[in-house]
Amino acid sequence: MFHWFPLLRESSRLANQGSYSCSTLTINGSLFLTFGNYYGDIHKYKTSSVVYKMDEPTEKFTLYQTLQTRGAYGVEYFSIADKHFLAVAHHYDDTYQLDSVVFQWNGQRFVVFQKLPTKGAAHFKFFTLNSEKYLTVANYNDGSTHSTKSVIYKWNGVKFNKFQEIATEGAMGCTAFEINNVTYIAFANLFTSQQKYSVQSTVFKWSGGHFVKLQSLQTYGAFDVKSVNINGHTFLAFACFYSGSSYNIDSFIYKWDGTRFVLFQSIPTRGAFAWCPFEISGYTFLGLANYYDSSQKYNAQSAVYQAFGAKFVEYQEISTHGARDMTSFEYKGNTYLAVANYRNQKYNINSALYKWV
């Protein structure tokens, strides 16, 4: 039967400037919420990104640290042994040829640890394969072409070194996942000069020494891809942003059939930017950040879907303003959903925190 939970209600707002991404992390029992800020009304692309910390007595996030970033897109938290890192993808600041930054926690705050040369970097994804640590970056454009290779870096015990280049087309998102102990990487491709927004997204499979292309999947202006496992079944959810003529298009969910991914469900979306899989009491949900609606503009409603039977069904809509990302977390027995709002009339707008009540 369809299981109804309490609804998401807005619990607080967090000051931000053109937020593109958000991520939670826990260090030594303390909960942090980070936002990658892409563009602000005052400092433009040099707008700082921010780290908020949960204040336990009030159960509210307070500003803890600002990070010097340039046109920040994705933020990815990960840990190696007892070290904590935050990778920030620098997308654009009058050039796509920017160093992205890996920050390390020094016990009190995040400091610059390593700079990685990137080309319109949009997203980082950290994963482990055969006990080795890897960090993948989705590169969008090198300044002249969208046919820009994305890169997988490998941890050598001290820093990240380039391990493999992957052919992508205007890549905006990437994710890594396992099926039957085999590792795969999927890229969400946004645009190419030949196919425009009809460019296909791609899945790569670990071959034992490197990744090889397994499959191309039809998407339209894809900005994000997330994997989700439900009862042993693996799904890939692509957020389709723009077809070339409309933002009100379907986003696609593919399902693994044992050898490849096949289309499982098409979901009507509105300038979809990012998926956020999460679970409550064993039930799987997919949050979706909708950025732009052809009629409602940046006031497009974002949505939460629940896995129910043989499909995902809409569970709730939430009010957002040019939403570009969302992340879910639990705190003191409650489930929250943080939404990165990018813009309404201005870029300096609040992002929102929702609570299941």
Image (cartoon, rainbow, N blue to C red):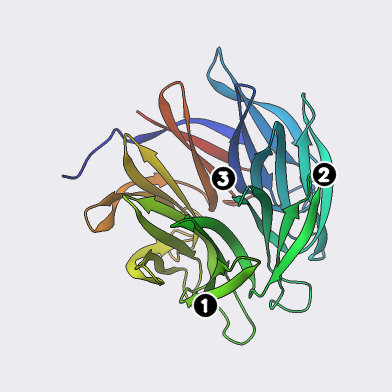
Say which residue label 3 marks: 340
- In the rendered view, tell whether residue 134 sits above or below residue 64: below
Q: Residue at x 67, y 59 (%)?
A: 122
Q: In which quadrant will I find the N terminus?
A: top left
Mark 2, residues whose alpha carbon is within 10 Å: few (<14), some, or many (≥20)? few
Would residue 238 be found to the left or right of residue 100 on screen? left
Residue 11, x across and y down, in percent: 46, 29
Quick one: label 2 or label 1, which is nearer the N terminus? 2
Does residue 123 appear anywhere in the picture?
yes
Is 349 in front, or is 70?
70
Closer to us: 52 or 174: 174
Instruction: Report if the CB atoms under discs 2 and 1 are less than 8 Å apart.
Output: no
Q: Amino acid at mark 3?
A: Ala
Label 2 or label 3, whichever lies nearer to me, is 2
Numbered-mark total = 3
Q: Which mark is residue 200?
A: 1
Where does the image place residue 34, in percent across and percent down from the top left? 64, 38
